[in-house]
Amino acid sequence: MTVRQIIGEGFALGCALMLGLAAGAIWLVPTVFLHRPLPWLAVPAGWLLAKAMRKWVHTRKWNAAVLAALAVVVASVYIRVLITTVNIAAMLGYGLIDALRTAGASMLLDLARFGVSKQDVVWGVIGIVVAMVTALRSPTATMRKPN
């Protein structure tokens, strides 16, 4: 591998992580609005992340599939951490940022791990499978208008 390829793959990995974090943050909005976890949103999140990976991040099928699966895992973990943070903030009367800062990453990850159910894991795995299958499919051709 050349240095250019290594930098490109590292950038693609960073993009996958950031897209996963963004998907988790967006996933928080309906979760907080409805006052309950929505683990089934892993499926549309996986589909959307796979489309983004294949179209904008990586054009190779298998690389895009692995990056999309990683992004779904990051989004699923991040939504669990955010839900835990929201619950702590509500119980203690803190703001969201204060709860994040006070609790710390290790405590939030441990509490998030305690709150994961089998249903969450099943929906997460389904989201990963949807992401990988979607990323492996060839992108749809866009129609251009004739001049």
Image (cartoon, rainbow, N blue to C red):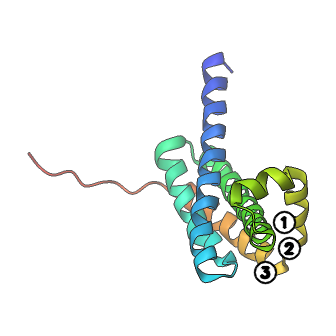
**Residue drawn where x is 85% and y is 51% of the image:** 104
- Secondary structure beneath dot 3 equals helix
Q: Badges 2 and 1: C-beta atoms under 8 Å apart?
A: yes
Q: Amino acid at mark 1?
A: Ala
Q: Which of marks 1 and 3 precedes in the sequence? A: 1
Secondary structure beneath dot 2 equals loop
Q: Which residue is mark 3?
A: 119
Residue 89's image quarter?
Answer: bottom right
Badge 2 local density, few (<14 within 10 Å), some, or many (20+)?
A: few
Q: Is residue 56 above or below residue 117?
A: above
- Residue 24: image quadrant is bottom right
Which residue has dot 1 on it? 112
Q: Quadrant of the C terminus?
A: top left
Q: Residues within 10 Å of mark 3 (few under 14, many from 20)?
A: few
At a point 78% along the width and 58% down the height, the residue shown is 99
Q: Is residue 68 left or right of residue 101?
A: left
Percent x, y for residue 118? 84, 79
